Image (spheres, helix red, strand yellow):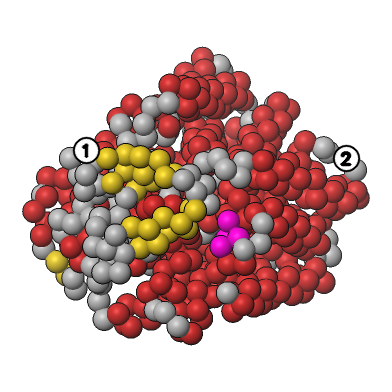
Amino acid sequence: MTLSIIAVVAVTGAALGIGTYGVRLARTTSDLFVASRVISPWWNAAAISGEYLSAASFLGVAGLMLKFGASALWLPVGFTAGYLTLLLFVAAPLRRFGSYTIPDFAEARLPAPYMRLLAAGIVLLISGCYLVPQLKGAGVTLRAITDAPYWVGVVVVAAIVALNVVLGGMRGVTYVQAFQYWVKVFAIACPAILLLIHLGGLPARSALFGSEYPTTGPDGMVVELDRPRTLTFPDTGETRTVPAGELRLPPDTPVPVAAGIDAQTGEQWSRPVSESGRGSPLLIYSLLLATFLGTMGLPHILVRFYTNPDGSAARRTTVRVLGLLGVFYLFPAVYGLLGRAFTPELYVTGDTDSVVLRVPAAAWPGLMGDILAAIVAAGAFAAFMSTASGLLVSIAGTASHDVWPGRRRRRRARFRVAAGAGMVLPALLALATREMDISVLVGWAFGLAASTFCPLLLLGVWWPRLTAPGAAAGMLAGASVATGMIAAGLIADVAEDTALGAILLQPAAVSVPVAFGTMVLLSLRAPAAPNVGATMAALHVPEAQR
Amino acid sequence: MSLPSSDLTEATAHADVYLRRLRREQLRLALLSLVAFGGAIGALPLILYLLPGLHDAELLGVPVPIWLVVVPPFPFFLAIGWLEQRRADGLDDAFRDLLEE
């Protein structure tokens, strides 16, 4: 435990140190916003990957795999596919166009003042929704490694991130995030590899892949419950509520599962695709579509393309990102598999998101396990910090540049004020939702991104006929359909693992075609814009060779 | 030092035609790559669904379907991305050569 605190402090300190070094370099406004566009493809690729690999990737994938089974392994595939689409359609033209933010792009491509405000509003909404779970993850992690109250982690991470962004801007953040990518890869890969070598293979194979449920082991199991839980016992099928306190389970019996988890045999659990439930092909396609289109429209990712020196460098950066993400995503599955073998008590507490943090010490008792646990904890912290920093840069950039314009000279001051203020609301939300499952916020952020910015960028870059009224109506239609469907799913309380629930809670399959259709139909009715030739040239003419 | 793109566009009277052709070729390349990766990744869930027996085959003690989801998609994405980047840069180079003629 002490080791974990030391590791977290060391990584956070190093990140702050690099951020401060970046401050000395951040002299101009353009440094603060887009790192003066002098960052090399490798640095930029590591920074993009570092920013993108959030709590959801570091803790969430393994946690969902433990909870629901191997069907969760499609998540990283969708997350990465989004980058490939960015490379194919958006990276180089967006960089050439030379706007600072998405609202900049929206207004320059489709000259109408309301385009900027509309895009800015959506950026703030998506970034805010996505920032809350990062702060919650920080609170949960700090509590898991230090027993500190939940609010301490939230406040500490919010304060450090805000300070870093206020002082360093984008340039400081670029180096910090490149550093944090390597911290995260090391922190997830090294313990996984060492644990597999130490164990010499996977234990408890019949609970992993065979016909058995995870069991309590030869000595039984003692679980500490901090509040009453409704548990289902798979051997008898009985469901009952147990009080808070110590729960003693007899030896060699199947582990009971908390509400919201289905007890599965190894054979059911380990199938990435199955006949029904979360592994059914319909749900998997819906998941792939939602993650892949949503990634394309995440504003804190898109702003990164402006930090490349030219369009070709933007392409090279994105190819490197595909490689770096691929390396990282090899490992969450290891923690899912080991977690089912070594930490089945998480099925009882329902706290499956902490599986990555708990596996090392459980699978390798003693000093080595503690060291590995410390490494993993440091990586998890790097994950919250880097994603939260990227989101805050995007919030502050948009708020100070698009929503609250003013004299150029004051832009740095406005950026800093906006960065400080932009952290307050998400931090308060994170504190208020401690006991709530807020994965719906992330789903909403992805749904909004997929049904607004994804069509705006694709049509804006490739279709000269797109008009401002068409684009605005399309984004509003997409956002309303996505929001309405998620709200309907919540109000009707449909289960996520049914076909209806999958469509309602991952609305991209419906809302994205609606947005595209609205944009195309309304734009076709208007006459072609007169100056669109010059705009298209700015997007597609390659830079002269240097 | 890079030239502002407007200089390039005004460089010759043919630039407009060339640019439209470049845009169309880049879009075709991007769509082709999208079909390639969408087809392969889209087929994977269906293959695993239609061949449930794959689950009994194991590699290093782990069922083959898990390997198929965790490992091959990522090198595949990288390969497609790398090929597309080279082709797209090549199209840009050809456009520059055309303008310099």
Query: Residue A357 at what x, y percent from top left?
Result: 48, 66
* Number of the label disc, if any, that sits on residue A268: none
Query: Residue A385 at what x, y percent from top left?
Result: 64, 61
Asked whether, in this view, residue A537 is left or right of residue A463, the answer is right
* Number of the label disc, if any, that sits on residue A276: 1
Q: Secondary structure at mark 1?
A: loop
Residue displayed at 57% across by 43% down = A435
Q: Is residue A279 magenta?
A: no
User: Nearer the observer, disc 2 or disc 1?
Assistant: 1
Residue type indicated by callout 2:
Gly
The magenta span reads: A140-144
Q: CA distance from mark 2 to mark 1?
A: 56 Å
Q: Is B83 in front, or is A157?
A: A157
Asked whether, in this view, residue A546 is left or right of residue A113, the answer is left
Task: Sort mark 2 into few (<14), some (14-19) or many (20+) by Cα contacts within 10 Å.
Answer: few
Residue displayed at 14% across by 66% down = B58
Residue displayed at 42% across by 34% down = A506
